[in-house]
């Protein structure tokens, strides 16, 4: 420990990267925000021993020396909540990157402080309550058109209730202007459109609900085979180059959540640059408006301070909970939780904590649980049904799913989309392996699917069974070749290939294939399995597999996913009729030929 000349207030006594030890901190509290040095670098108290406190700093501590002044703020790390969040791009501690660029240029200066929300901008506030109304926590008193896609509801803070003494008329106000005065048991309190909330504290709800609706993503292997419920948690593990980030981009673009929160947590700068460039230019497929009008981006790349990476997922999930409280369905995409866990490991090492498996801190499972458990389908304080769905990418070194982050993540999620290196190398995307993946939400969302397609579960089960049987047959084929198999088993190999190429593989660049509606998904699967069932019946009659493969409609079945749009399901029906006619004709030819022979 370095001796420091006595000072009137708290000072730094030891610096180790982002970790600073400070003396004179007897009045500090855990997770209290402090400002370090003349630049006022933002930090957070993570350990207190007597008069000494350990601080993790969310900015670069280069040139900070022992003796630097420490200013305690008396408040925990919190985010600003209000109109203006949607469409913005933040770093891990909610500093707006466009605002910082305008102020300091392309590089973020240390100690740079920019308000998370534009406090000078005026928003058109429309009151939805009146003077004399009794209001409780989370109740809506007004609304603001935040974007053409998002109506922002102004809610009573979770810790406030009482009677509205006065509320402003419809008009333009800043975030700091009082819009209502509420008479509470503790006295009259002014309410503005701006609120603050601690990022490590979950926002309160009335109750948790059973998940019943799927999060429709338009990706066939996800929606049909391994669905994610609205309010559920999923993981996308995969080695380098398997398409984790691209898969998350597809989900962010096409999922039917009303708000998207994309957290770039420790990813490479070029990947995050691609997100920041592409997302503002993407078009929302449902409304035709820019996708950013319902998206919040949090960018904390691998070259940014490691401590800010650790807190970035809490920032993201808090913003998601805020919009959930408005009664909206929110989807959170974290890319990647492995980089976040690596930040925990580095910080734990500098805190001199006892390492656990592979050097990760012993608290890793708890921290993962704290993140994933903040999702869910809920009844809000205002009594509305809403949800936060969480999809976390995991980057196991070498694609090893037995490493700690992947294994601990599996304990807290119910949907596992395992990316496969061999599929990615074969350019089969999304490279989600149908035998290594699973979803425990299939039973929960069955009712939703069967309301429109009563045979959904039957089709799904039959297709997965075929793929499992094909995998076992491939073991035999590798040993003795396919020619020794009977036609009934070779038919399984044939149909499985059609399932893989004509259903599971999906092009993100094909206009008809990039998004597949639930109705089209079921129609395509029903078509392929109809070919299997009819082929199986023909083989039982003695028709050779070669003739079945040679039918004209087979190539069209394989191309159907890209040949027909989501609004052209009648063409899938026409193809199904052709399939029936051609198989019937083949059957008649075989029966006639057999009769002539006899």
Image (spheres, helix red, strand yellow):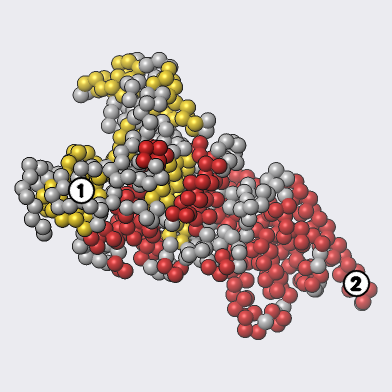
Name above or below for residue 504 compared with residue 12: below
Name above or below for residue 348 compared with residue 521: below
**Residue 300 in sight from this viewpoint:** yes
Please report whichever mark, 2 or 1, sits nearer to the chain's N-terminal start: 1
Residue drawn at x 41%, y 23% is 122
- Residue 271, how many percent across, how many down? 48, 54
Cα–Cα gap, marks 2 and 1: 86 Å
Badge 1: how crowded within 10 Å, few (<14), some, or many (20+)?
many
Q: Return the residue nearer the eye: 212 or 408.
A: 408
- Quarter holding residue 267: bottom left
Mark 2 secondary-structure assignment: helix
Q: Is residue 334 left or right of residue 51?
A: right
Label 2 sits on residue: 593
**Residue 465 in sight from this viewpoint:** no
Q: Quadrant of the N terminus?
A: bottom left
Q: Quadrant of the C terminus?
A: bottom right
- Residue 161, how many percent across, how many down? 29, 26
Query: Closer to the observer: label 2 or label 1?
Result: 1
Label 1 sits on residue: 45
Q: Return the residue nearer the eye: 547 or 334.
A: 334
Residue drawn at x 43%, y 60% is 394
Mark carried by residue 554 = none
Badge 2: how crowded within 10 Å, few (<14), some, or many (20+)?
few
Mark 1 secondary-structure assignment: strand
Q: Return the residue nearer the eye: 401 or 44.
A: 44
Residue drawn at x 28%, y 22% is 190
């Amino acid at each position: 420990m370095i001796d420091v000349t006595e000072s009137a207030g708290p000072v730094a006594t030891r610096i180790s990267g982002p970790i600073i030890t400070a003396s004179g901190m007897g009045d500090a509290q855990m997770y209290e925000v402090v400002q370090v040095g003349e630049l006022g670098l933002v930090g957070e108290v993570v350990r207190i021993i007597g008069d000494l406190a350990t601080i993790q700093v969310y900015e670069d501590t280069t040139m900070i020396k022992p003796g630097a002044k420490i200013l305690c703020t008396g408040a925990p790390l919190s985010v600003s909540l209000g109109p203006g969040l949607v469409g913005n791009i933040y770093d891990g501690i909610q500093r707006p990157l466009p605002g910082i660029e305008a102020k300091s240029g392309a590089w973020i200066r240390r100690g740079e402080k920019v308000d998370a929300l534009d406090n000078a901008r005026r928003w058109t506030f429309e009151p939805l309550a009146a003077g004399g109304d009794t209001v409780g926590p989370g109740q809506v008193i007004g609304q603001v058109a935040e974007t053409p896609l998002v109506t922002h509801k102004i809610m009573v803070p979770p810790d406030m209730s009482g009677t509205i003494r006065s509320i402003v008329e419809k008009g333009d106000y800043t975030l700091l202007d009082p819009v209502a005065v509420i008479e509470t048991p503790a006295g009259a309190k002014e309410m503005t459109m701006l609120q603050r909330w601690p990022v490590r504290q979950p926002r309160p709800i009335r109750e948790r609900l059973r998940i019943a609706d799927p999060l429709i993503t338009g990706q066939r292997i996800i929606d049909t085979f391994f669905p994610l419920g609205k309010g559920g948690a999923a993981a996308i593990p995969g080695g380098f180059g398997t398409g984790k980030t691209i898969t998350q981009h597809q989900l962010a673009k096409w999922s039917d959540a009303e708000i998207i929160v994309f957290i770039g947590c420790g990813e490479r700068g070029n990947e995050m640059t691609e997100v920041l460039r592409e997302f503002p230019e993407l078009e929302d497929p449902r409304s035709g408006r820019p996708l950013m009008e319902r998206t919040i981006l949090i960018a904390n790349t691998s070259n940014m301070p490691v401590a800010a990476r650790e807190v970035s997922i809490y920032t993201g999930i808090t913003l998601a909970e805020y919009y959930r409280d408005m009664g909206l369905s929110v989807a959170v995409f974290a890319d990647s939780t492995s980089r976040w866990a690596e930040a925990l490991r580095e910080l734990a090492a500098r805190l001199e904590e006892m390492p656990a498996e592979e050097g990760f801190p012993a608290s890793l499972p708890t921290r993962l649980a704290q993140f994933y458990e903040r999702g869910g389908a809920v009844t809000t304080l205002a009594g509305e049904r809403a949800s936060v769905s969480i999809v976390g990418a995991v980057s196991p070194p070498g694609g090893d799913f037995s490493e700690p982050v992947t294994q601990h993540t599996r304990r807290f999620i119910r949907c596992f989309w395992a990316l496969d290196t061999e599929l990615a190398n074969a350019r089969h995307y999304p490279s989600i392996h149908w035998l290594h993946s699973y979803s425990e939400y299939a039973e929960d969302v069955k009712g939703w699917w069967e309301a429109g397609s009563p045979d959904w579960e039957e089709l799904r089960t039959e297709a997965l069974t075929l793929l499992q049987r094909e995998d076992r047959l491939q073991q035999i084929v590798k040993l003795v070749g396919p020619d020794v198999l009977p036609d009934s088993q070779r038919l399984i190999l044939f149909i499985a290939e059609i399932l893989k190429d004509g259903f599971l593989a999906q092009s993100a660049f094909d206009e008809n294939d990039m998004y597949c509606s639930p109705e089209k998904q079921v129609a395509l699967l029903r078509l392929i399995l109809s070919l299997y069932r009819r082929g199986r019946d023909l083989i039982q009659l003695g028709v050779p597999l070669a003739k079945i493969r040679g039918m004209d409609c087979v190539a069209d079945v394989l191309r159907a996913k890209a040949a027909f749009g989501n609004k052209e399901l009648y063409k899938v029906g026409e193809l199904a009729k052709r399939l029936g006619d051609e198989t019937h004709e083949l059957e008649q030819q075989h029966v006639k030929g057999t009769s002539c022979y006899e």
